[in-house]
Image: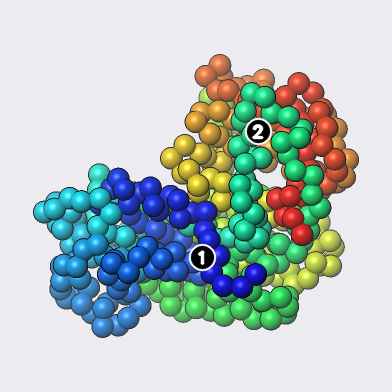
Amino acid sequence: MNGIRNRWFSRNLESALKVLPVTVVTGARQTGKTTLVRMLGAKRSFFTLDDFGVLDQAERNPDSLLDSRPVTLDEVQRAPQLLLAVKRAVDEQRRAGDFVLTGSANLLLMGRVADTLAGRAIYLELPPFCPAEWSQRKGALEPVNRLFAPDFDLGDWPDKKGNWQRWLLRGGFPPALAIESDRDRGLWFAAYVQTYLERDLRQLSDVASLPDFQRLMALAANRTGKLLNQADLARDAALSHPTAHRYLNLLETGCLITRIRPLAANPSSSMVKAPKLLWSDCGLAAWLAGIRSAEEIGKRLDSGFWLEQTIYQTLQSWRALDPTNRRIHYWRDRAGHEVDFILERDGKLVAVEIKASHQANLSDAAGIQTLKSVLTKKQSLVRSVVLHAGKARPLDKDVFALPWGWLVED
């Protein structure tokens, strides 16, 4: 399939433009933000701060860029002071859909942002493609939504063959997905990291040593799917704890990593409170971790974590379609009982455990059973699933073994 692919995310953008005067679309470089907003129509003015002339104008006379409403301003993280001009323009004349801003950084996490546009803007983060979206499968995430339904049936969950190793290496950046050769795609990821280090990172913060930062990136990639221990990461990277902390914050600000927070179950339980580290793009994470082929994945002792990272590529797309009402958590107690992901929608919970094997039994849901015992009455665990490589079948009341194949359909 060639040409521009439709983004599921476009429905979020269209809805936001009808409600608030400012819509801010953030996301990592190369997720397709500019392509998405340029499709909003010819009547909307478009200026990108990647153009040095426009950037100079944004710094010297920002109000002049806002005269031709409606207007889209691309890569606004390059001139954070522009947000003050947008705020003034909205306060002078408030009209839904007037301003669309894009940024390759989470503006809410940037220390140099002069104003967050509270009450005037909605912030939406565009994730990389997941396999189903890249394949343009309509309604592909409906099976995930059906997990929350009271009448869920095994027939609601597709039984398809999948190749998660293939999707792990490809990731979800459109330019990388268009490259079939693993070797050639590796060159693209190398160029992406170089651009991030030498350009985007310097726009966000002063970093004394780019090699130190890149070393931390590689070490963080090798910890994907695991609990984040910043002290251990700092030690292995030969960095001070404050420096490692700042570098991780920069990766999160650049929309490259996500720190999944634990579900707050029973506050009195011995729950682990450290976040779980995951990357927004599995292909970039795999390249940073030194994974260059499917054969290498199978030789790694941590291959289960990489399966989890690959499936997260789809789960983050599910969350992004309704960021107000959907959340993703994990859970672990100090005895080692763990649930890989807990999906939340409108206050209801679905526990998800991920296994690489073709066989699944009730013992694979041991962490889920422990979680049930500590949940408060206000928390509703609707259903529990063990995603595995085999066939679908019930394991217990509201506990199902389901195949993960369709999430990474070949």
Q: Amino acid at mark 1?
A: Thr
Residue under label 2: 147
Q: Earlier in the sequence, mark 2 or mark 1?
A: 1
Quarter of the figure with the C terminus:
bottom right
Q: CA distance from mark 2 to mark 1?
A: 28 Å
Q: Tell me if residue 192 comes above or below residue 131 in the rendering.
A: below
Snapshot quadrant of residue 220? bottom right
Q: Describe the element under mark 2 as helix, strand or loop.
A: loop
Percent position (x, y) of residue 305? 72, 52
Front residue of 334 and 225: 225
Q: Residue at x 79, y 63 (%)?
A: 297
Q: Amino acid at mark 2?
A: Leu
Residue 128 shown left or right of residue 10 in the figure: right
Percent position (x, y) of residue 239? 53, 65
Percent position (x, y) of residue 11? 45, 51
Q: Which mark is residue 31?
A: 1
Q: Tell me if residue 226 comes above or below residue 185 in the rendering.
A: above
